[in-house]
Image (spheres, rainbow, N blue to C red):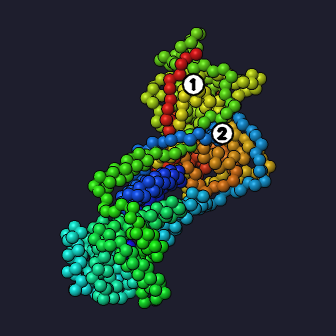
């Protein structure tokens, strides 16, 4: 009973999607399938062809959603979520005589630097692999069924006596192309196959059927051909394989199969008595029951409706209250329009976590002033220079902080990201300069960089009405890798505590020295001096010690215990200084930066407002 497709094997493109996009698509498919099932239920007294059109449109939406979600620009729906406090590490060079020394937990678990290791399987990778395996498993019956149908068609015998009967009924049904008639001894009931060259395949004993039974069976199968059920059912079955984990999709599939058969039954009832056709369906059920026990009559996987469907169909055939007939042009157009509208409306939607500022951490007093030509508009006219650098974004004095810059720079400083990781801001966010002066609640305790960032997050949400979400974008990056001449790091000692210092040496040189620093923190420090995100590809693990010596405009080739020469203060250009730091890392530590492209986390500003001054 179930039509199938012959011809070349179907190629299914598996889209590589991120876990967030996969979750969004699964949610959209849930909504779409639920709407399709509800619509079919509301139309339960309407024509079966109308219900089938609604369900077919639903499966079309399910197949198009992943493609449209990639093509159409996203429209994010932010869901409030807590934000982790990210430790903001300063650049390798932020000032003279910088010093940090804190105990490091887990000192006994230091790992000596090792050769590059293969990345561990993440949960998202495991889920993706499980989904792909499920798709392959559920597509297997489709492939096997198509192969079985193709074999049946090739081995079927043309029925010349039945060909004129089928051609006459085809013209009466509005089919103006040739439909071939075949007989096959392996079939227990009639079926159709083919799209471009359709065929009706009948059991071998169809030659002995009475004319009325033969006509009813042929009319049913020709209605499948006219409706193009071969295509719609195979596409729906592929959608079931893609969403194999979703129970609603399988429920909709069974409904689609049943409504297609009932639509063809209605075509038969337009020219035959209901009781006679019901008796024929009961006889078909008996034939299918016998065929299941006979190895010689093994039905193709995609060829037959099951006996449960036949029982439901018999009840529908005898239901005099049920509307019959084909779906009208208006109903088909309405189903197609609803499908297009759903794809257009739902595909751009992406549910994302919209982190909020950490509760309970805010400034006691804060003023926001717009600057005019770099000068603040408040009494006293103090000239506050812009201090919003990536390494030291705040000017901190006790419990007081000051910060000059654009909203774009403030967001980058508050969430410890680079400027290029902030997007979606309004035009004024990059052109208007503001001064922020604020006091922390505890006047007797000096505010730290991390505390200042958390409080700035609250201030941006309150005064600038900043709302944003995190996303990912493929950007130019650097891979930090070991060169062939890598000198490696010195493994950290088991009893050492973390310490990092930047000092000025004789001769205008600068020294950056760290002990017991994690490789992850080191990579963040390197990234602070680079013009792109830096991703660790060194394969080094554990905690390390390092010691580099550098000078803006000149890269030393070695680091010794002391450097001869004069002293003096150095006020280098930041770009020259960053270049010198990166050159020193490459020459003295044997590491290098390789240009590449990779997915990087970005902050997308969804809303921001200019603050009122106070």
Mark sitting earlier along the chain (1/2): 2
Q: Is residue 5 above or below residue 50?
A: below
Which residue was labeled with disc 1? 463
Q: Residues within 10 Å of mark 1 (few under 14, many from 20)?
A: some
Query: Is residue 485 at all visible to an observer of this figure?
Result: no
Q: Which mark is residue 522?
A: none
Number of residue marks: 2
Q: Which mark is residue 85?
A: 2
Q: Quadrant of the N terminus?
A: bottom left
Measuring from the top left, give residue 266's x and y in whole percent: 34, 67
Q: Residue at x 55, y 65 (%)?
A: 130
Measuring from the top left, give residue 151's x and y in whole percent: 35, 82
Q: Is residue 420 above or below residue 156?
A: above
Quarter of the image where one finds residue 302: bottom left
Going by the picture, which residue comes out furthest to the right? Answer: 495
**Residue 213 or 378: which is nearer the viewer?**
213
**106 relative position to 221: left or right:** right
Q: Residue at x 61, y 60 (%)?
A: 120
CA separation, marks 1 and 2? 21 Å
Q: Secondary structure at mark 2?
A: loop
């Amino acid at each position: 009973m179930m039509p199938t497709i012959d011809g070349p094997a179907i190629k299914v493109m598996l889209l590589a999607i991120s876990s967030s996009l996969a979750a969004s698509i699964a949610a959209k498919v849930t909504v779409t399938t639920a709407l399709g099932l509800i619509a079919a239920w509301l139309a339960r007294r309407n024509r079966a062809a109308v219900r089938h059109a609604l369900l077919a449109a639903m499966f079309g939406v399910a197949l198009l959603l992943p493609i449209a979600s990639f093509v159409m620009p996203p429209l994010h729906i932010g869901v409030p979520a807590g934000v982790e406090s990210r430790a903001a590490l300063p650049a390798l060079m932020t000032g003279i005589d910088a010093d940090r020394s804190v105990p490091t937990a887990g000192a006994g678990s230091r790992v000596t630097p090792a050769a590059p290791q293969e990345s561990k399987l993440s949960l998202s990778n495991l889920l993706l692999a499980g989904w792909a395996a499920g798709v392959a498993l559920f597509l297997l019956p489709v492939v096997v069924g198509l192969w079985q149908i193709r074999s049946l068609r090739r081995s079927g015998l043309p029925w010349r006596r039945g060909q004129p009967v089928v051609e006459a009924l085809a013209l009466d049904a509005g089919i103006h192309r040739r439909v071939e008639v075949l007989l096959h001894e392996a079939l227990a009931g009639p079926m159709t196959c083919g799209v471009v060259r359709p065929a009706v395949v009948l059991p071998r004993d169809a030659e002995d059927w009475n004319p009325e039974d033969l006509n009813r069976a042929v009319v049913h199968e020709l209605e499948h051909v006219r409706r193009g059920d071969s295509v719609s059912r195979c596409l729906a079955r592929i959608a079931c394989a893609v969403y194999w984990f979703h129970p609603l999709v399988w429920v909709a599939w069974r409904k689609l199969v049943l409504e297609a058969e009932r639509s063809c039954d209605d075509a038969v009832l337009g020219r035959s008595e209901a009781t006679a056709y019901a008796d024929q369906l009961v006889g078909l059920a008996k034939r299918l029951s016998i065929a299941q026990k006979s190895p010689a009559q093994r039905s193709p996987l995609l060829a037959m409706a099951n006996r449960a469907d036949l029982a439901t169909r018999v009840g529908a055939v005898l239901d005099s209250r049920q509307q019959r007939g084909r779906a009208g042009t208006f109903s088909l157009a309405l189903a197609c329009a609803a499908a297009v509208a759903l794809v257009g409306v739902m595909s751009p939607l992406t549910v994302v976590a919209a982190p909020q500022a950490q509760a309970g951490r805010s400034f006691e007093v804060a003023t926001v002033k717009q600057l005019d030509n770099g000068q603040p508009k408040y009494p006293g006219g103090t000239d506050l220079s812009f201090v919003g650098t990536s390494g030291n974004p705040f000017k901190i004095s006790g419990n007081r902080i000051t910060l000059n810059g654009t909203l774009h720079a403030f967001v980058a400083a508050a969430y410890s990201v680079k400027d290029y990781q902030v997007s979606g801001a309004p035009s004024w966010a990059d052109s208007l300069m503001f001064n922020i002066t604020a006091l922390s609640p505890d006047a007797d305790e000096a505010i730290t960089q991390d505390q200042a960032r958390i409080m700035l997050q609250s201030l941006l949400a309150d005064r600038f009405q900043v709302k944003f979400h995190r996303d990912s974008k493929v950007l130019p990056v650097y891979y930090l890798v070991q060169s062939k001449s890598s000198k490696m790091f010195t493994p950290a000692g088991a009893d050492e505590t973390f310490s990092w210092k930047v000092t000025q040496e004789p001769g205008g040189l600068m020294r950056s020295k760290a002990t017991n620093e994690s490789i992850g923190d080191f990579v963040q420090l390197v990234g602070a001096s680079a013009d792109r995100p830096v991703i660790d590809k060194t394969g080094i693990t554990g905690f390390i010690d390092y010691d580099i010596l550098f000078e803006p405009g000149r890269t030393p080739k070695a680091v010794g215990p002391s450097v001869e020469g004069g002293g003096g203060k150095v006020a280098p250009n930041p770009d020259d200084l960053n270049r010198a730091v990166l050159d020193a890392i490459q020459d003295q530590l044997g590491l290098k930066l390789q240009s590449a492209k990779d997915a990087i986390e970005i902050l997308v500003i969804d809303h921001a407002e200019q603050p009122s001054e106070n």
